[in-house]
Image (cartoon, rainbow, N blue to C red):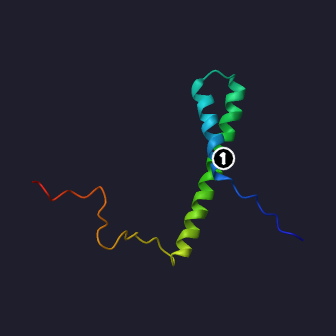
Amino acid sequence: MTATRKKPVDLEKSLAELEGIVELLEAGEQPLEKSLRDFERAVRLSRECETALKDAEQRVQVLLGGGLQEFAGEPDGGGGEDEEDDNDD
């Protein structure tokens, strides 16, 4: 007996489809039945994407040893664009 595995969600593809459905629904130019079918599909896609994101977050937590850790960045403060310039000549 083989276990049934769900096909992994292609997050980018699902989000693009969801975005397209939202645009169609916002336009309001479809018949009611088509809008309802599209809305049902959008709800399914949204739930699939949410599950995929939660799974990804869980995998990251496992890789980081059980908890999310703050990214330290560059040890010397970086010298990036966000720092104020102390030279007011």
- Residue at 40% from the left image edge and 69% from the top image edge: 71
49 to 36, vertically: above or below: below
8 to 67, vertically: above or below: above
68 to 11, vertically: above or below: below
- SS at mark 1 in the image: helix
Q: Position of residue 76 (x, y in %)?
A: 29, 72
Q: Residue furthest left?
A: 89
Taking the image as shown, residue 64 lies to the left or right of residue 33, namely: left
- Residue at 67% from the left image edge and 47% from the top image edge: 13
Quarter of the image with the N terminus is: bottom right
- Residue at 47% from the left image edge and 74% from the top image edge: 67
Taking the image as shown, residue 22 lies to the left or right of residue 85, namely: right
Q: Which residue is mark 1?
A: 14
Q: Nearer the viewer, residue 34 or 14?
A: 14
Taking the image as shown, residue 67 lies to the left or right of residue 88, namely: right
**What amino acid is at disc 1?**
Ser
Q: Quadrant of residue 24?
A: top right
Q: Residue furthest bottom?
A: 65
